[in-house]
Amino acid sequence: MSYLGISAGFHDASISVIDFNGDIKFAGHAERYSKQKNDSCLNTDMFLDAYEHAGMITHIAYYEKPLLKQLRNWRSGIGFDWKRMSTWQVLDRTIPPRAWKMIGTGIPQSSYHHHKSHAAAGFQTSPYDDATVVVIDAIGEFDTISIWHAHYDRNGQAQYTKLWNQKYPHSVGLFYSAMTQRAGLKPNEDEYILMGMSAYARPDYNVYAEFIKDKDDIEFHDNLHAGCESYRPEMTDFQIAASAQYTVEQCVYRIMEKARKLGSSKNLVYMGGVALNCSANEQLGNYFENVWIMPNPGDAGSSLGAAALAYGKKVNWLHPYLGTNIEGPYPVNKILDELLTKKIVGVASGRAEFGPRALGNRSLLADPRGSEIKDKVNEIKRRQKFRPFAPVILEEYVNEYFQMPKGFSTSPYMQTVATCKKPSEFPAIIHQDGTSRVQTVSKDCGSGIRELLEKWFVLTGCPMLLNTSLNIKGEPMVNDRSDADRFERRYGVKVVS
């Protein structure tokens, strides 16, 4: 018996499969197969890939309530799609015909509230039996923020109680997307660039006051769904970025303070697209003792949340390497040869990461010590020069090189920033504000990057590498070997498997 979770129809479509033992058999992104960034549509190739690992599907779970979403669209003036009223209607238009033939007919189906799917993707993969769950995103059906108490009952079934919520149009996520567009970037895609830009200017603290009218419930003066492209024309894009980042951080901290007061747990599970803002995450330890953010907290991760809700119990989370498999052992020695001679190398090996960040299996790696490396990697990826890169480091050495924030003794999924203690030695992974988005690697991380770092350390005395996603500009991360070959041809960088 396997549970198929689906997130599709708006952006970042994905599927996940959990078997009757609670093992995650597959979790993958549609965009990696179609090569269309943030693709909202599912495709047959992804289902074929899933079936190699998952086998027969006996239950289909959808990540939101279609009727409620259509009702919100109607109330917001977008209109009503009569062909997407029920879960069956949505699934019939979402799952490709060839995939239906693999799945079969007459399979039970269920749908869950958008924010509950977010919550379950976090809580049921977390190490906790009891937690306060916070979800902050752009919008679900109506909820834009929700706070939950989650625990397991005596039968091991996950139980969720909603403690508080904020509804559309008041949305922290929509505000950040609107500011992303105001800064000349693409909303629902380039928010991470806006976060990087924020370090290059001082925020205008008046922006927070201008947008927020109710500081307790985080209500906004305007409906930000329409954007705010004409806002403050005298401000530079970097000033907009800094001011937007400050505003979001203040909102997140107010929400966390409310969550701490409403909840009874010292454990925080944090989900939704805003949870990808690692600069804001730096302060989460001021509100909770323990923090868990599943490495795919946005809508794509909610396919796993829907499957988890259908399964009902704690899911066996081991690692995020759950997608397409490129067979063969992790090419440690080949990577080392390239690093020692050319200082930069791509790796495409093993199963692809589930989530937006490369964690070693679909990565572009480089020596972090050279002064020229950052510009060289940005040039290879055709990125703006201000864009930062992350260090991947042996877990046991992280405190020697970084001041980890409270609540984050480790950071296996690049979910927070930390101040580097030796910035002059590693210029390639230091951002303008002196921080780095750290990835720590444990002995049981699930990827061969652990062995690579160990051997790199023996050879160089350096326990870290620069790590960024392996992707062609405008496309998602490399998925299979043919993608890796295209990367090699276009950029002249060796990609080993």
Image (tube, rainbow, N blue to C red):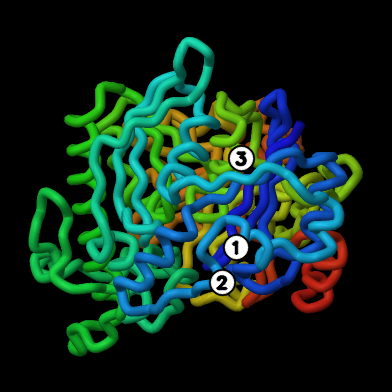
Seen at 19% across and 67% down, the residue is 203
Whether residue 436 is visible to the viewer of this picture, yes or no, is no
Q: Which image quadrant for residue 181?
A: bottom left
User: Callout 3, which amino acid?
Assistant: Ala
Disc 1 marks a residue whose amino acid type is: Val
Q: Residue at x 10, y 53 (%)?
A: 215
In this view of the protein, which residue sits in the foreground, 156 or 205? 156
Closer to us: 111 or 167: 111
Secondary structure at badge 3 equals helix
Tag 2: residue type? Lys
What secondary structure is found at the residue carrying circle 1?
Answer: helix
What residue is at 51 percent from the left and 21 percent from the top?
A: 157
Q: Is residue 147 above or below residue 278?
A: above
Alpha-carbon span between mark 1 and mark 2: 8 Å
Image spot of residue 62 (x, y percent): 58, 50
- Residue 311 against residue 32 in the figure, above or below: above
Q: Are marks 2 and 3 in contact (CB under 8 Å)?
A: no
In terms of depth relative to the viewer, which is nearer, 26 or 98? 98
Q: CA distance from mark 1 to mark 3?
A: 17 Å
Q: Which residue is mark 2?
A: 83
Query: What residue does disc 3 label?
Result: 307
- Asked if the residues shown at circle 1 and circle 2 are in contact, with their CB atoms under 8 angstroms apart, the answer is no
Precedes in sequence: disc 1 or disc 3: 1
Q: Residues within 10 Å of mark 2 (few under 14, many from 20)?
A: few
Q: Earlier in the sequence, mark 1 or mark 2?
A: 2
- Structural distance between the alpha carbons of marks 2 and 3: 24 Å
Q: According to the image, label 1 marks what residue? A: 90
Instruction: Label 2: state its secondary structure.
Output: helix
